[in-house]
Amino acid sequence: MSRTRTALLAALALVAGVSGPALAAAPAAHAAISAIPCTVDYKIQNDWGSGFTAAVTVTNNSAAKSSWAVKWSYAGNQSVSSYWSAKISQSGTAVTASNETYNGTLATGGSVSFGFNGTYSGTNAVPTAFTLDGVTCNVDDGTGSGGGGGNGGGSGTRVDNPYAGAKVYVNPEWSAKAAAEPGGTRVSNQPTGVWIDRIAAINGVNGGMGLRDHLDAALAQKGSGQEVVQLVIYDLPGRDCAALASNGELGPTEIDKYKTQFIDPIAAILSDSKYASLRIVTTIELDSLPNLVTNTGSRATATANCNTMLANGNYVKGVGYALAKLGAIPNVYNYLDAGHHGWLGWDDNFAPAANVFKQAATSEGATVDDVQGFITNTANYSALKENNFTINDSVNGTSVRQSKWVDWNRYVDELSFAQAFRTELVSVGFNSNIGMLIDTSRNGWGGSARPAGPGPTTSVDAYVDGGRYDRRINVGNWCNQAGAGLGERPQASPAAGIDAYVWMKPPGESDGSSSAIPNDEGKGFDRMCDPTYTGNARNDNNMSGALPNAPLSGHWFSAEFQQLMANAYPPLS
């Protein structure tokens, strides 16, 4: 729900006392400063009877500021419990919200937003008076227009599947790059994920679109129907501890910076009532929680960095905090990353991963209600459905599970894994209506190398290798894979338990550079992106299978995009 209050007395008094053209003779900025020095828009976005989420936007119409403090008092027993994008203190009924280090600058005519959760009993009346640095502000709006936190209807109630009956946002920046490639207009109108992978990306980097820019563009695309916007939230401390190409900007211990400078500003923007009619799908922190399961302890695949993140708990804390903050926004749908079948499909990983996800989803104030689903195969290459063999097949008495490719995994493709893992997640306490997303942006494996039928039955390896669509050297290979193709086009409700097939990874964006490239983006050189690399324990010491001449992760890789189109399955027309 959304509640606001209007107090236009100061403005009305000024208008009533003015005759003739006197006010018009003054410059507009001067008039704004004199009439209304500041405006506060206080909205209760969600109220569940004993607690609430509020969003506050302050507009400064006086001289520019390098720091600020907003104050108000409650008429009841409301108590602020947590907050973001401002430092909030409370003494009795009096509340003070002051700037963080990164948002102290407030220009003339500029605005700043922050939010908080609170508790109360009895009534939850909206404050009637606010000051900015001691000066009384006007209290804005009161009409409720554009308010509400619902999904197109302003009801505040999430739909079961956000993709059902909705268009999905086409990122104009990605679309332009795709359309500029020969033949790229065949797919340039497809929806892809918007990656918020560092603090600077919130406002846009190198002149590119920031988060608000994308949300504004989504509103323009929306029209009168429903619109989904897909965001990848990806900047945990010590990010991606088992790889280097996607290492992030935050060190292993910088959990407070992650909360206050990354998640809080994102939450403040997403909670703006301007965007309440959008269905905002967030993919939460790729590769983090699965790494705690498979790359820690005494395993051969363990890394020192992953053991550090397991010990300090900051992956679990960060994910829980993100789920809690974003889950409090009624039109946001959180999907947790669940790796892929070639990562978590083994017995040693399957159930333990579900339990780690439950741990994260119930930490830092989060609950399972803050999780609307899970996503598999994000930015990966695992085939959607292997039709030429099943996990139950055997060759000359030898199970497919014993083949070098399957290697005792319980699953041979993403669809069977996603559906089974959904059942496991429900069994450990997640809601029974959770849905799964599968990233099909690069798992088509079409073209002339796509097998037309099963392999020969001379051996179990010949049978599997001759029939499998996934042409990687090893299922652990993940960087810019040679021979890959675009997969199924994005679509809603394609199979039981699956909310959508999505292109969360924008096709044509590199996974990592083939050689070391100096940069200020926090991205290291990972040998798994080097086509000459002979591998490690995580890919059974096989060749990397990576394409040559790749740029930094996230940068446009024309040769890869051309390959993906050439090998698309279903083929491009």
Image (tube, rainbow, N blue to C red):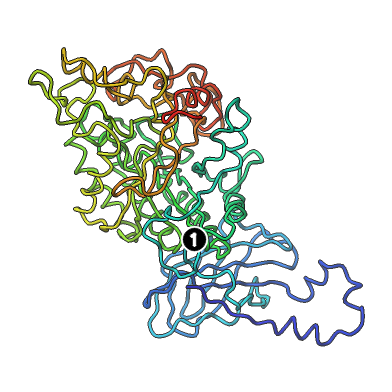
Residue drawn at point x = 45 percent, y = 55 percent: 165
The residue lying furthest to the left in this view is 397
Q: Nearer the viewer, residue 441 or 37?
A: 441
Q: Nearer the viewer, residue 179 or 272?
A: 179
Q: Nearer the viewer, residue 509 or 444?
A: 444
Residue 241 locus on image (x, y percent): 36, 34
Say if 553 sits above or below 268 in the image. Answer: above
Say if 249 sits above or below 69 in the image. Answer: above
Picture quadrant of residue 375? top left
Residue drawn at point x = 60 percent, y = 25 percent: 182
Picture quadrant of residue 479? top left
Q: Is 270 on the left-hand or right-hand side of 407?
A: right
Residue 123 locus on image (x, y percent): 43, 84
| Disc 1 packing (10 Å; few <14; some 14–19; many ≥20) | many
Q: Is 515 on the left-hand or right-hand side of 341?
A: right
Residue 201 locus on image (x, y percent): 56, 44
Residue indicated by mark 1: 84
Q: Secondary structure at mark 1?
A: strand
Residue 45 locus on image (x, y percent): 48, 70
Residue drawn at point x = 38 percent, y = 59 percent: 324
Q: Amino acid at mark 1?
A: Trp
- Number of callouts in the render? 1
